[in-house]
Image: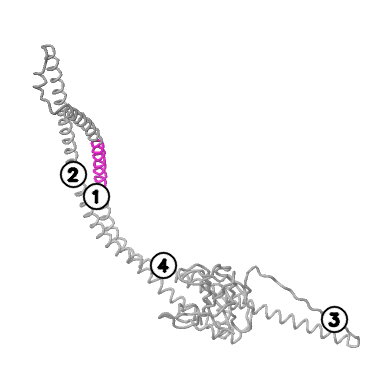
Amino acid sequence: MNKKIVILGLAAILGTSSLYIPYSSDNLAFANELEERKQEIESKQSDVNSNIEGKQGEISELEAEKKQLDDDIQRLDMQISETNGKIRDEEANVEATKIEIEKLKKQIEEVEARIQERNELLEDRARSLQESGGVVSYLDVLLGAQSFSDFVSRVSAVTTIVEADREIIKAHENDMKALEQAEADLNSELQKLETALTELENLKSQLNKQATEKAKLVKQVQQKQDDAMHELHEMENESAFLAEQARAIELEEERARKAAEEEKKRQAAEAAAAAATAKSNSASSSASQTSSSGGGSSSSSSSSSAPAPAVTSGNFMWPAKGTFTSPYGSRWGKLHAGIDVANRAANVPVVASASGTVIRSHYSSSYGNVVYISHRIDGKVFTTLYAHLDARHVSAGQSVSKGQQIGIMGNTGRSTGKHLHFEIHNGAWNGQANAVNPLNYLP
């Protein structure tokens, strides 16, 4: 099998068999690397899919265990609900009893007021007797009658006074006894209700304790389930990312091929134009020529408050203007797999460090708004990452050119200040496994 057939075969795999690309050592090297990367991604994706199936089985078992515990908790919840209903009823009875006691207290106050009035009446009578010369017995009053008619009047008066005093005392005693008995009865009923309430509160406390114990078990199972679901989602995300990355690498290869074709056409057109110019100059060599040249400058204004970095030579350029704040290397006990660039200006543009194809543009809990781009440079695959963006201006599968704005610097995700976290990976993105120091690639 010759080299040309190998190239055409790879083009067929990538869906570009209609594009004829002349053989070159650079194309062959990239084709071989691309095939290796594809095989690595497919192998890793197969392992991830296998792990996903195992994790789904584990989750099913945990869900069955959690279902049994949920049934137990539901029974406890019903018992607690019933107990709470009884407590509410008893509390209502207690409140009603308290209201009755308050009414009784008001009645007692009214009775005491009447008794006080009686006492004042008796005190006035006693004081009147003292002022008239001392205490006069009812017998002396009767014996001092001047006539029978006077005697009858005095007997009647004494009887009325004695009966009035007796009625006062009797009414007082009856009122006090009745009210004291009623108050004692209500206090007794209140004590019973408070005792019942205490018992119900104890029952509720016991049920809550049981529910708490069950909740601990459920929490353990839920934690296992959450961990398993998190791992599953991570695996599913990794599987999706691998598929997106494989597609982006293919699109980047296609973009690079088209760029090479366009460059070839441009060079051919320039050569043809140069040949035509040379022929024209040769035909009119005896004629004199004058030429003038003028220059103009075009200015563009950006809606951003901060300017975008100028496109520089080399394979990569700085993705944003600002202050270099954190290098690649160990930080806080783990690898800081990129560099940080900070800029306090408003709307700081973030640009593609090199031409390529966007793998993914999404929000991550750790990176915040993040963009991944796949590149083909000097026949090799590279991946760049732009994290903590305030806004993203590109989407997956989109082709971007070097220096093209892809977002705005921000402070999203696990970030403590406005900055850009920038990574370069030598090859297809594989976590931190193939991260390299960006400073070794930037001008």
Q: Do the numbered discs 2 and 3 sit on residues whose CB atoms are within 8 Å? A: no
Q: Alpha-carbon neighbours of circle 3 within 10 Å: few (<14), some, or many (≥20)? A: few
Q: Which residues are magenta?
A: 81-105
Look at the magenta stretch and give its main secondary structure: helix
Kindly identify which residue carries mark 2.
Answer: 191
Residue at the (47%, 82%) spot, across then down: 434
Where disc 3 sits, the SS reads: loop
Q: Nearer the viewer, mark 4 or mark 2?
A: 2
Disc 2 and disc 1: Cα gap in Å?
25 Å
The residue at which mark 3 appears reads as 292
Front residue (pair 1, 138): 138
Considering only order in the chain, which callout, 3 or 4, is on the residue closer to the N terminus? 4
Looking at the image, tell me whether mark 1 or mark 3 is earlier in sequence order: 1
Mark 4 against mark 3, which lies toward the viewer?
Answer: 3
Residue at horizontal 70 percent and vertical 71 percent from the top: 300
Which residue in the protein does label 4 denote? 233
Query: Disc 1 designates what residue?
Result: 79
**Other residues around mark 1 within 10 Å, as few (<14) / some (14–19) / many (≥20):** some
How was the colour assigned to the protein in this rendering? one colour
**Which amino acid is tagged 3?**
Ser
Q: Amino acid at mark 4?
A: His
First in sequence, mark 4 or 1: give its number: 1
Between disc 4 and disc 2, whose residue precedes?
2
